[in-house]
Image (spheres, rainbow, N blue to C red):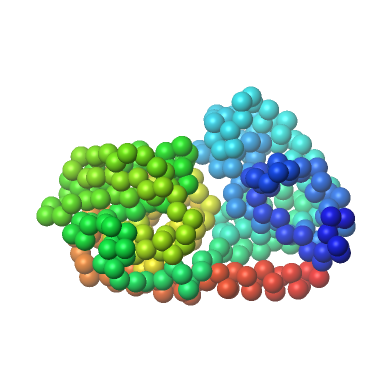
Amino acid sequence: LDLAPWQPDIVHCHNLHSFKGPMGHFDLTALPALSEKVPVVLTLHDAWLTTGHCAHPVNCDHWRTGCGDCPDLGLYPPVRADATAENWRRKRDIFSRCRLYVATPCRWLMNRVEQSMLRPAIIESRVIPNGVELTRFSPGDPREARRRLGLPEDAHILLFAAHGIRGKSYKDFPTLRRATELIAARISGRNILFLALGEDAPAERAGKAEIRFIPYQSDQDVMADYYRAADLYLHAAKAETFPTTILEAMACGRTVVATSVGGIPEQISPETGVTVPTGDAEAMAEAAAAILDNKDTAKRMGAAAAKSAWNHFDQEKQADSYLSWFDDII
């Protein structure tokens, strides 16, 4: 705290396992002393603080009882040896000496927190949904967006966006690929183009469909155009918290077909999209093809998605919720 010219009223922490600055990762042993001096608000974006290793436990409940005997050391962030039980105990001991204000973007993650070794450290908790910048992510003319991006106007375009699509197993690109192949087999009369945005790689075929890889885009206006250019946004992850890409797609008026994991069911309603079981390419393809085959349904659901984003996922509302909480804490 002595690095600042004055002592802050609040310290707001986010992911403590992915700090990429010159100092490396955050040292969790600093949390007890820090929370003793000033109120510390901790926003979780995944489950890493509740486990002995991974950010997204996939089909594993070891985090409830102490980890150890880890079924997948390669899950993000990967580790080379199984010290998960010791890591879990160290976190528990650190949290036993902390007093924290904890926020999550969805009720699903808060439920996990309340069942974890982080629970005794919590003074107060709140669920504050992620928001998006609605002045940038908003409905627009799909044809204009396609022209700007150099995309075909006569194809059905499917979109998925993630940083490092094939390198993260829990994003489940194989299911997306298979679903795209099945969609193309069901749809006649128009080409199917699947845009995998977030990775630079040669284009490939999935049956009758083309898969085109698009490098990661840092320009939000360009990202908004990709959402507008798409007919559907697909999301097949095996594990998620509260993906911003789904909110951005909804804000741009796009219907979403996604797996029913994590906080995704809190983002999508039957009026705005469809949720399917994880790993079920058949169900994803069936839902997507039904929407693509009915322009009125797609238009109605897209409009409802944009309205839902406007009502519930405005970045300004997210900021106001945090500022109001800060004021209460101080």
* Residue at the top extreme, as displayed: 81
Return the residue nearer the eye: 75 or 271.
75
Res 214 seen here: yes
Return the residue nearer the eye: 197 or 305.
197
Taking 134 as reference, is 273 left or right?
left
* Residue at the left extreme, as displayed: 189
Residue at x 21% of width, y 67% of height: 295
Where does the image place residue 316, in percent across and percent down from the top left? 58, 73
Q: Is residue 194 above or below residue 89?
A: below
Residue 18 lies in what quarter of the image?
Answer: top right
Residue at x 20% of width, y 64% of height: 294
Residue at x 76% of width, y 36% of height: 90
Res 123 seen here: no
For the C terminus, give its image quadrant: bottom right
Return the residue nearer the eye: 190 or 329.
190
Taking 304 as reference, is 157 left or right?
left
Where does the image place residue 88, in percent across and percent down from the top left? 71, 36
Residue at x 65% of width, y 50% of height: 15
Q: Is residue 276 above or below residue 172?
A: below
Residue 290 lies in what quarter of the image?
Answer: bottom left
Taking 187 as reference, is 216 left or right?
right
Q: Is residue 314 above or below residue 33?
A: below
Where does the image place residue 204, in percent across and percent down from the top left? 27, 39
> Total of numbered circles in the picture?
0
For the N terminus, give its image quadrant: bottom right
Where does the image place residue 13, in percent across and percent down from the top left? 71, 55
Residue 140 lies in what quarter of the image?
Answer: bottom left
